[in-house]
Amino acid sequence: MKILLINGSPNETGTTFTALSEMKKTFQQEGIDSEIINIGNKAIRGCIACGSCGKTGKCAIDDIVNEVAEKFITAEGLVVGSPVYYASANGTLISFLDRLFMSCKADKRFKVGASIVCARRGGLSSTFDELNKYFLMNQMPVAASNYWNSLHGPNAETAEKDKEGLQTMRILAKNIAFMIKSFALAKEKFGLPEPEEKIKTGFLN
């Protein structure tokens, strides 16, 4: 069992990394393999709506998005971490997620999803909501903790003092591990729900 941890911060060892690292330690204790992937400092352009991925099953822009997509196929879960920029996620991360979720044609149903957000002070709730929509639109159950999944601090040293935030990360990781293990048993016994062909409608037809 494996879960991918996406670090959307351009600072590879900052507050977002601190939160993900706390989760990684907990996953190890729970017997879940995890990998932190730093994408926040990469040159990742947004989706160009070329439609190529619908034919080839991968993004036409061959960069780290396609690399992570291959790992996403076999992973049981995805955690996305971002710093807060103007009450929103890092733009590089959004470009990454737009292309990953559009181009990766793996069955995402019942892969566990979770987002974590980090800031010096405010704007976390709107960023948290923004990131969770990627999971909710792809039939990915969203894991919860005992508070909003956030860690405060302008740097890693300060973030380490946010004991409540670090506890939130540990509980979130434990809940994700439980969900992954439970879904594995449920899939073995019951299988996945029968899928329906996607119906797409427009407001003018």
Image (cartoon, grey):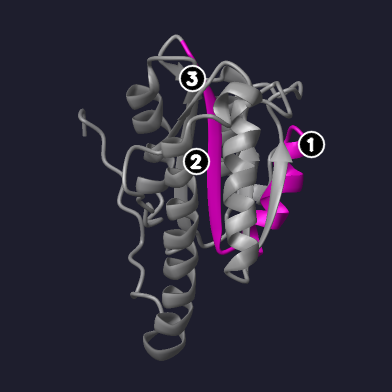
Find residue 50 and report its horizontal and vertical position in percent.
61, 30
The mark that comes first in sequence, 1 or 2, is: 1
- In magenta, the rendered stretch is 60-85
| Left or right relative to 98: residue 113 | left
Instruction: Specify whether residue 70 is painted magenta.
Output: yes
Q: Nearer the viewer, residue 150 or 47?
A: 150
Q: Which residue is mark 1?
A: 62
Q: From the viewer's perspective, is residue 69 above or below residue 197?
A: above
9 with respect to 129 (left or right): right
As shown in the figure, which amino acid type bears the numbered disc 3? Ala
Residue 200 drawn above or below residue 191: above
Name the residue located 21 percent from the left edge and 34 percent from the top edge. Answer: 205
Decide: marks 1, 2 in contact (CB < 8 A)? no
Q: Residues within 10 Å of mark 1 (few under 14, many from 20)?
A: few
Q: Nearer the viewer, residue 201 or 71?
A: 71
- Front tag of 3 and 2: 2
Local crowd at mark 3 within 10 Å, few (<14), some, or many (≥20)?
Answer: many
Nearer to me, 193 or 140: 140
Q: Secondary structure at mark 1?
A: loop
What residue is at 32 percent from the left and 41 percent from the top? 147
Can you give x and y, in whole percent of width and height, for residue 185 in the image? 45, 84
Circle 3 residue: 119
Q: Which mark is residue 166?
A: 2
